[in-house]
Image: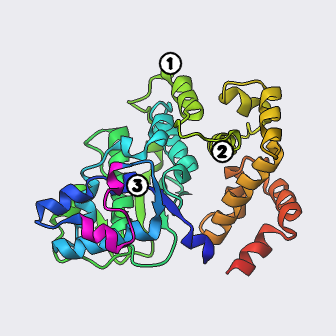
């Protein structure tokens, strides 16, 4: 449970909250403070804030505004760019499926608590959106599914419609906004939250992609230094978070992403009392534990996310780090 309490999200998740509340004559500042957030959080989109506090702020705002569809209305104020650096990585992927895969792989950079998984069933693919952590999350879940739907429309064109949009929430009294945002094929009281699409959609070309810009966008995200006095260790951890699933987590490759030689990187880390492999193991350990505790991804999916060649290789590494297999760790964490 401590893992769930430590989940964070970029404050960009609050984009539009104050304006939407204001349109209903409600001041968002007291709601944010009541949820344990600074009243100015929305002004610092890259600030990491607790997911449970953001979820609570959404629920409080929906109640104060008297809008059960508050989350959907909030989602309309956002776009692809709301994902921050992830949008740069996904935008220039060649196909819709590749763009979605980039978002899925790097989603923790935006939201630790949101896990998006894909299930293939012949000609149909189910995109599940699962929010981890305690507390009410109706509005946050609506936002997650609506944002995924919006991104799919941006990747495929405004005429596209999902085969079905499933929400575990009860059927609302007023369906107008749900149909407007999510389309006509809705199912409430479902056993999962997500979107059902045709498998062929994943192979369609991404209309936003510019092949020539793809390597530059990727490099910009990995090299970007926010200028807040980060140590070399912190910069390495930030790059590792982006590279884990690529299988290119070598000291040489990370050094290149940071614009330095491998020897310079090694010396800088030694001066800070650490080593590259220690940082790599620490980053992998945190991500592995988060997903094992979440119980959404399979062992194989987690192994792939961490860049291991097979589930067996992941299990061997995990046992060396934590003294037990991933399955045993997951069982005990339950």
Let me know if residue 112 appears in the view.
yes
* Quarter containing the C terminus: bottom right
- Circles 3, 2 touching at the beta carbon (< 8 Å): no
The span from disc 2 to disc 1 (Cα, nearest Å) is: 30 Å
| Residue range (magenta) | 29-43
The span from disc 1 to disc 3 (Cα, nearest Å) is: 31 Å
Point out the tag, 2 or 1, that comes first from the N-terminus. Answer: 1
Callout in the foreground (1, 3)? 3
Point out the tag, 3 or 2, that comes first from the N-terminus. Answer: 3
The span from disc 3 to disc 2 (Cα, nearest Å) is: 20 Å
- On screen, residue 244 versus residue 121, left or right, reads right
Q: Quickly name the residue at label 1.
A: 212
Q: Position of residue 174 (x, y in %)?
A: 16, 72
Q: Residue 262 falls in which quadrant of the image?
A: top right
Viewer-proximal residue among 201 and 211:
211
Label 3 neighbourhood size at 10 Å, few (<14), some (14-19), many (20+)? many
* Quarter containing the N terminus: bottom right
Viewer-proximal residue among 91 and 46:
46
Q: Quickly name the residue at label 2.
A: 234
Is 198 drawn above or below residue 165 in the view shown? above
As for residue 33 lying within the magenta part, the answer is yes
- On screen, residue 178 versus residue 124, left or right, reads left
Secondary structure mostly taken by the magenta-highlighted segment of the chain? helix
At a point 36% along the width and 72% down the height, the residue shown is 35
Is 155 drawn above or below residue 218 in the view shown? below
Q: Which mark is residue 11?
A: 3
């Amino acid at each position: 449970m401590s893992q769930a309490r430590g989940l964070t999200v970029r404050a960009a998740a609050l984009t539009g909250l104050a304006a939407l509340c204001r349109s209903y004559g409600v001041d968002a500042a007291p709601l944010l403070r009541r949820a344990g957030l600074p009243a100015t959080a929305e002004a610092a989109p890259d600030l990491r804030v607790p997911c449970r506090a953001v979820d609570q702020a959404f629920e409080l705002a929906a109640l104060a505004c008297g809008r059960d569809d508050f989350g959907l209305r909030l989602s309309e104020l956002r776009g692809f760019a709301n994902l921050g650096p992830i949008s740069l990585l996904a935008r220039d992927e060649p196909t819709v499926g590749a763009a979605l895969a980039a978002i899925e792989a790097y989603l923790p950079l935006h939201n630790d608590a949101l896990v998006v998984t894909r299930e293939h069933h012949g000609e149909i693919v189910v995109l599940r959106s699962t929010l981890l952590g305690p507390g009410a999350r109706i509005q946050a879940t609506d936002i997650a599914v609506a944002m995924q739907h919006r991104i799919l429309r941006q990747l495929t064109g405004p005429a596209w419609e999902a085969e079905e949009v499933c929400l575990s929430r009860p059927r609302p009294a007023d369906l107008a906004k749900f149909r407007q945002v999510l389309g006509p094929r809705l199912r409430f009281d479902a056993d999962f939250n997500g979107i059902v699409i045709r498998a062929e959609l994943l192979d369609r070309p991404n209309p936003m992609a510019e092949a020539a810009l793809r390597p530059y966008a990727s490099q910009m995200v990995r090299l970007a230094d926010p200028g807040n006095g980060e140590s070399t260790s912190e910069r390495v951890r930030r790059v590792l978070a982006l590279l884990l699933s690529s299988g290119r987590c070598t000291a040489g490759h990370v050094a290149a992403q940071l614009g330095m030689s491998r020897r310079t990187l090694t010396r800088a880390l030694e001066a800070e009392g650490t080593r590259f492999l220690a940082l790599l193991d620490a980053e992998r350990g945190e991500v592995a534990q988060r997903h094992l505790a979440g119980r959404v991804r399979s062992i194989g999916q987690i192994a792939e996310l961490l860049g291991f060649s097979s589930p067996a290789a992941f299990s061997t590494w995990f046992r060396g780090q934590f003294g037990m297999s991933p399955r045993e760790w997951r069982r005990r964490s339950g």
